[in-house]
Amino acid sequence: MATGREPLPVGLYERYLAVRIRRHDAEPPDHVALVITERDLLEQGAYGTLTDFFGWAFEYATRVTVYVSVLDSAAIPTLRRELEAVDAPRGIAVRGPEDTDPADAPIQIGIGLGGKHELTSAVRTLAEGVDAGEIDPEGIDDTDVEEHLIFPSEPDLVIKTGAERLSDFMIWQSVYSELYFTDINWRDFRKRDFLRAVLEFCNRSRRFGR
C-alpha cells in the first residue's frame, strides 16, 4: 500500500508553480540573468534548452542576460556564432572580451566577459576621458561608471546551474540581485526548475542593501 502523497505529474506540477507565482503578493523578476559554462553548451540539446529558457523567462521578464563562463578563449568565436544563431523570441546582443560598446537588446549574452574585465574597461574609458579633458574627475559618480558597462542594467534574479559558486559575472550590476543556485546541470534544467527559481525570488524580501 502506498504511503504519503504521490508526486504530481510534471505538467501539473509546473501549472501548480505558475499559479503560486501568479497569486503571490510579490512581483516576479523583470530582469533574469543566467550563468552557465562553455561545457554546458557542448551537451546535446543545450541550445534548444536555451531557446526554451528564453520562452519561460519572457512569460515574466522583459530582459534576459546570459553569461557563458569560458576556460578556453579559442572557443569564443564558435560559441558566438552558435549563440547569435539561436532561435529566440526577442532580439539578441552577443558580447565578448574584445567588445566595448554596451549591449542594448532584450536578450544580452556575454561570452567569457568577466565582471572584472567589464569594470576595468569602464574605468579605463573614463580615465581616457579625463586625460583628454572631456570629463571632470570630481564629477564622476556611479552613474558614469554604469553608462560605460557592457551590460548596464541590473538583474533582479541571477540563476546559476550546476554548482553553488558564482562566476566572475556582473560584479557591479548584481550587488543587489537575488542569487539562486541549483545543483541541477544545464542539460537537465527544465521549466519546473526555472519556476522554482522565480517562486523563490517572490518569497524573498528584497532590501537592496538597506
Image: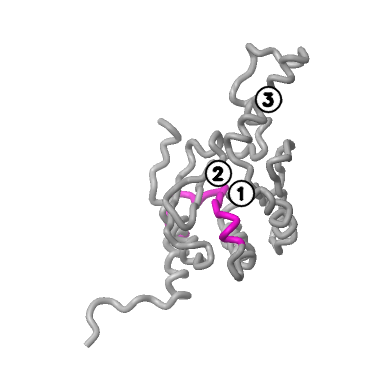
Cα separation, mark 1 vs mark 2, equals: 8 Å
Magenta span? 22-41
Sequence order check, earlier mark of 2 and 3:
3
Cα separation, mark 2 vs mark 3, equals: 24 Å
Quadrant including the N terminus: bottom left
User: Which residue is tagged 1?
Assistant: 65
Say if the magenta span includes residue 60: no
Which secondary structure, mark 2? Answer: loop
User: Which residue is tagged 2?
Assistant: 155
User: Which residue is tagged 3?
Assistant: 124
Instruction: Determine the residue positioned at 48% across, 46% down.
Output: 166
Is residue 31 shown left or right of residue 93?
Answer: left
Sequence order check, earlier mark of 3 and 1:
1
Instruction: Determine the residue positioned at 39% across, 51% down.
Output: 203
Sequence order check, earlier mark of 1 and 2:
1
Which secondary structure, mark 1? Answer: strand
CB atoms of marks 1 and 2 within 8 Å: yes
Report whether residue 138 is seen: yes
Residue 142 location in percent, x, y? 59, 25
Kind of residue at disc 3: Arg
Instruction: Determine the residue positioned at 71% across, 38% down.
Output: 102
Q: Residue furthest bottom?
A: 1
Cα separation, mark 3 vs mark 1, equals: 24 Å
